[in-house]
Structures are given as C-alpha cells and as structure tokens.
C-alpha cells in the first residue's frame, strides 16, 4: 500500500512538473515555438555558426532572391538567423552625402556611424530602438526599480510634459510604452490617457528617462549592464543625435548598432528572455504581454513592439488599415520598426530572426518592401517549416 501511494505521489509530481513547465512557456508567450529544434547562441567573440540552407530545408535560390530584392531596395545589411545560426547574410555599400541634390538633409548619412568589428556598418536604428527600451523596462520592473503602473511624474517629477499638473499626474509608464499617453507630439494634452492611440516618439522617449532615473544609471550604463554585454553586442551604444534640432520634446538619443547585434536582441526574445541558459528578462509575464495587443485601439501594437496578429492596424502615420502588418508573413511575427526601413523581425513558428538596415527602400522601387521580402522568405521555406508543429523551447 505504501509503495502504491508513493508511486501515485511520484506520478502526480511528474504531471504537475509537466503542467508547470507548459504554463511557464505559455506565460512567456514567446519561446514556446521556436521552429523545430534547439536554439544556438553565438559567442561574443569568434565565428558565428552558419547553417546550410539546403540541408536545413531552405531553397537557396529563393533565399538569394530575398537578398537581391534587399540590395535593390537600398539595404546596407541583411541578416537572417534560423534557430540562431546564420542562414543568410549580405552587406552593401551605400553612397551618401550630408545633403541631397536639393540641399535637404540626408537622413541616412547622419544615421550612419562608421563600422564596427568585422567591418560591419553601424547605424542608428531609428524607432527600432523602442523595442530595446521595452526590454529594459521589463528588466527594471523585475528588479523592483519601477512598475509599469507607476505615474511618470513619480520618477521624472512634475512638469515633464506640457499638460496641467492634474492631467500629467494620470499618465503612467504603461501609457508611454503603449502609445496611449493622450499627449500630442509637443507633449501638450489632447485626451485622457488610455483613450486614444497615437504613435508619439516624444512621449515614448520619456520611458527610457524613467528607467535611467529609477536605476540611477545612464542609458548606456544600464543597457550595457543589463542587455548588450550579456548578449555580446560589442558594437551597440546610445548616441547623441547631433543632427536633430535641439527641441525640448525631441528624442535626441539614437541606438547605434549592427545588423548582427540587433539580431542578438531578436534571438534572446525568441528564447523567452534567455541567452544560453542565462536569464536576461526574468519577468516572463511582462515579456509575453509585450508581444500581445496592449490595448483595443490598435491591436497591432504591444509594449513598443509591432504585431502581425491583427487584421486591424493603425500605422505610425495614423493610417488605418484592414490587413495584418505584413500579409505575406506568419501571424506570430512581431517586429521592431524604424524609419528608412530599419527592421528586426522575429517569427517564433519558423525559428527565424531577421534584421535589415539601410536607406529608405521605397526610394528605389514600387510596392511594399516588407511584404515582398517576406514573400521571398516564405517561398524559400519548406512546406514542413510553413506549418510547424508546436515544439519545445530553447532550453528543452
């Protein structure tokens, strides 16, 4: 009888452990389906392992078509990872001058910052930085330095916006990272927080200031300690945008990085906030919520991440669309997006992370670059990869 009870107890503990593991994976909402197989994490120094497209079920010629398209559309760098290994990578030299032929400021020139390790170009990734800040907010919350429910003035003090004291006091950090602060671009009051979705970089930029104030570190110090150093992002840093006119409401900090370093951010997110067994983003609930609809006004937006899961999208320019973000990509894709076509895409169901740097792809061709690029990638995938079965996380 004792043996029977012990056996039942053992079975119950095993079942509970299995259920708990599944619940944790579901809570993370990111790493439960990283394609098929375990993830590879590249070293900070040394060679990044490559995967042979043909041996891993990818059509090499069709992948080449995706790279050719990127080159034709003013890309300077494209990196595609499959389960962490390099599936495809290409670089192009883009000529650029401080101003164009009409004397207008050439944004690409001012957003290029030389070359880093391996001679790879470093660029300010524009608003793709927002998703990096989303991760930093989650890390800070787990450390007990802040809560996303905190009022912004708790950390920045009164007067950080142009709203009245009463209006400003109602705005939380969550409102900033979901683009629902209710403020105009000049930080004047427009609507109660949580009532209107507006892509507002000026308001968003205060979220990094909140993290810096709460941690007692500069943006570069906290980002290096919490994110870039653990991930081996040796060519990434925050920089002052000297070319931006000094306006009190402007976001004068740019995140300068390479296509490879940016891909490391995507790989860590794909792995559920871990890096080769080391926990980077410990708040799994926050991480999962960050890539889910954060409000009903624009269900294609999470916590500073763009989502491909909704057929209703409010674009950054306010345009309303009745299609998913990238129609040719899987619905579980989520993305960091910036001006001039800077991109970080993560597709858990395919185990794919892809990055694109460069100049505006619309300037050298008609059509939607994102849609055409992902059409080529999906055509390169095997039928089994397009309809993957649910697979275990990276640490299984």
Image: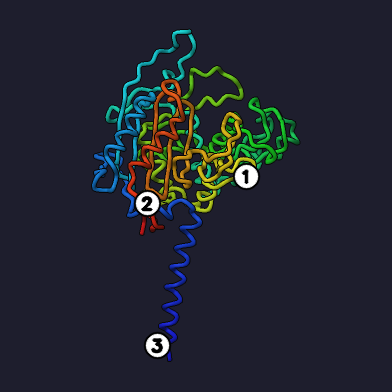
* On screen, residue 339 above or below 2: above
Report whether 195 appears left or right of 346. right
Work out whether residue 4 or residue 137 is closer to the camera in this orientation and state it. 4
278 sits to left or right of 23: left
Between discs 3 and 1, the one toward the N terminus? 3
Which numbered disc flags the more N-terminal residue, 2 or 3?
3
Q: Nearer the viewer, residue 79 or 284?
A: 79
Q: Is residue 274 visible?
A: no
**CB within 8 Å, label 2 to label 3:** no
Q: Secondary structure at mark 2?
A: loop
Q: Identify the residue at image location x=44%, y=68%.
A: 17
Neighbours of disc 3 within 10 Å: few (<14), some (14-19), many (20+): few
Image quarter of the N terminus = bottom left
Q: How many marks?
A: 3
Against 286, residue 371 (above or below) is: above
Residue labelled with disc 1: 295
Q: Using the image as rendered, state which of residue 80 and residue 215 is in the foreground.
A: 80
- Could you say where residue 351 lies in the image, as x and y percent from the top left? 37, 48
Foreground mark, 3 or 1, reads 1
**Residue 39 showing in the rendered view:** yes
> What residue sits right under mark 2 in the picture?
35
Of the two numbered discs 2 and 1 on the same chain, state the one appearing first in sequence.
Answer: 2
Q: CA distance from mark 2 to mark 3?
A: 42 Å
Cα separation, mark 2 vs mark 1, equals 28 Å
Which numbered disc covers residue 3? 3
Q: Position of residue 27 (x, y in %)?
A: 51, 56
Q: Secondary structure at mark 3?
A: helix
């Amino acid at each position: 009888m004792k043996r029977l009870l012990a056996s039942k107890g053992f079975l119950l503990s095993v079942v509970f452990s299995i259920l708990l593991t599944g619940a944790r994976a579901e809570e993370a909402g990111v790493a439960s389906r990283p394609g098929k197989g375990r993830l590879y994490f590249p070293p900070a120094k040394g060679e990044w392992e490559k995967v042979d497209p043909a041996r891993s079920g990818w059509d090499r010629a069709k992948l080449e078509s995706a790279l050719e398209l990127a080159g034709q559309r003013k890309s300077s760098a494209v990196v595609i990872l499959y389960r962490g290994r390099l599936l495809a990578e290409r670089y192009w030299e883009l000529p650029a001058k401080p101003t164009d032929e009409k004397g207008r400021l050439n944004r690409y020139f001012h957003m290029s910052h030389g070359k880093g390790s391996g001679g790879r170009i470093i660029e300010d990734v524009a608003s793709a930085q927002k998703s990096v800040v989303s991760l930093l907010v989650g890390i800070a919350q787990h450390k007990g330095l802040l809560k996303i429910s905190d009022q912004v003035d708790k950390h920045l003090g009164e007067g950080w916006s142009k709203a009245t004291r009463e209006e400003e006091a109602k705005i939380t950090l969550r409102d900033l990272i979901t683009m629902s602060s209710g403020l105009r671009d000049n930080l004047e009051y427009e609507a109660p927080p949580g009532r209107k979705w507006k892509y507002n970089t000026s308001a968003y930029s205060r979220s990094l200031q909140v993290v810096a104030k709460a941690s007692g570190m500069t943006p570069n110090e906290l980002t290096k300690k919490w994110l870039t150093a653990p991930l081996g992002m040796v060519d990434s840093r925050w920089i002052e945008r000297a070319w931006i006119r000094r306006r009190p409401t402007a976001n004068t900090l740019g995140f300068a990085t390479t296509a490879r370093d940016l891909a490391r951010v995507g790989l860590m997110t794909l792995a559920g906030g871990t890096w080769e067994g080391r926990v980077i983003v410990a708040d799994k609930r926050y991480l999962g919520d960050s890539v889910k609809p954060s409000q009903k006004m624009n269900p294609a937006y999470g916590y500073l991440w763009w989502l491909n899961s909704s057929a209703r999208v409010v674009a950054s320019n306010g345009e309303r669309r009745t299609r998913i973000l990238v129609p040719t990509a899987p619905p579980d894709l989520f993305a960091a997006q910036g001006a001039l076509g800077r991109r970080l895409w993560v597709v858990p169901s395919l185990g794919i992370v892809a990055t694109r740097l460069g100049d505006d792809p619309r300037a050298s061709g008609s059509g939607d670059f994102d849609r055409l690029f992902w059409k080529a990638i999906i055509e390169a995938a095997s039928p089994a990869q397009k309809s993957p079965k649910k697979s275990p996380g990276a640490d299984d």
